[in-house]
Image (spheres, helix red, strand yellow):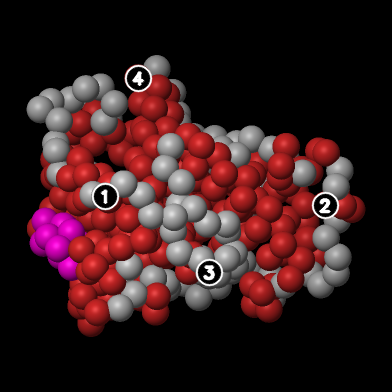
Amino acid sequence: MTEGVSVSGRSASPVGRLAGPQLPSPCGPLSEAVIERLRAGAGALPPAWDGAADADPADADPYGLDLQLALYVLYELHYRGFAGVADEEEWDPGLLAVRRGLEQRFLGALRKDVGTDVGTDVGTDGGGAGGEAGGAQAAVGGLLVEPAGDDGTSVSHFLRHEGQLWQLREYAALRSLYHLKEADPHAWALPRLHGRAKAGMAAIEFDEFGAGRAEEIHAQLFADLMADLGLDTAYGRYTDQAPAEALATVNLMSLLGLHRSLRGALVGHFATVEVTSSPASRRLAQAMRRTGAGPAAERFYDEHVEADAVHEQVVRREVVDGLLGDEPGLDADVAFGIGATLFLEDRLSAHLLGAWRAQRSALRSPLPDREP
């Protein structure tokens, strides 16, 4: 496994391909301005950012592909970067100013649509505005309630019962934008937490990062899953095929992780992921078995059934309770993080199920039968 061999016996590329991915193709004035700036290297941003209406974040669809792709590209500078783009661009003042405008548009829409306000501006270090007593606990409690049956809106239920192998491959390709960096965005919270919250999150992150074994890092397990499904395991490979709904779910994690002022919301996101993962992973493991996806594909979700059942207890009792014990004013922030996560995941589910039930690809361009 340390050489990138999957449990199925095929050779899978290690997660850590050191070269960054290629810059994606732009899809509108916002993403074009950002991507062309990075391709050109040092220098001013294109004139489009001087206030022209066709490249103004304030006028863009906050959930649209153009804004989400531009934001995704800027966030990736804080992860692996891109081939041919200097590492120093991560902290370029002009690019950070652009990112701030995109974030404000995105976060403002989420505050309006989710109906819970974190009470701070992006880029400030102020705490949350608080909220009704028990707001966060009520939101966490809602995550624990599994619907009695499939209401027709669950991707994991659909894939378990009727998903076809090509749909599982599309799902894995899209989820690779997160799973090949699994646990990384949440790690940004560690310096911002204290006591029980820090200890609890560090314990969970230790598991996510393989408990000291490189071949057990969850991102590597997902790369092995991708190899079983005949997908390219290169980091960022499927960015050009990801719809806006998928990019937005990953952007939310980066947004919350990169801002200290949003640490409570990041804990809410973390709680949502860990509490809801185990039952969904059980269904996805069953889908992998039913379709003959392969042992590594099954193992990834089997691992999450077991691990996340334990993580759920730790995140509720130590991370959330510990954070709110130290900083009760972040109650509304935690609730917002939960609500925003569910809102964007619901949008992605609706997109996927709408396409798959019509027997068409949910990607911007269909996958080949098998990657070379």
Q: Which residue is mark 1?
A: 133
Q: Say which amino acid is labelled 1.
A: Ala
Determine the image quadrant of residue 333: bottom left
Residue in the picture at 31% in, 63% down? 328
Do the residues under discs 3 and 4 have CB atoms within 8 angstroms?
no
Residue in the picture at 66% in, 58% down? 99
Mark 3 or 4, closer to the camera: 3
Residue 84, position in %: x, y? 69, 70
Residue 220, position in %: x, y? 31, 66
Classify residue 88 as left or right of residue 168.
Answer: right
Sequence-wise first label, 3 or 1: 3
State the CA–CA distance, disc 3 to disc 4.
45 Å
Mark 4 or 1, closer to the camera: 1
The circle on residue 49 is: 2
- Disc 1 crowd, CA 10 A, few/some/many (<14, 14-19, 20+): few
The circle on residue 125 is: 3
Mark 3 or 1, closer to the camera: 1
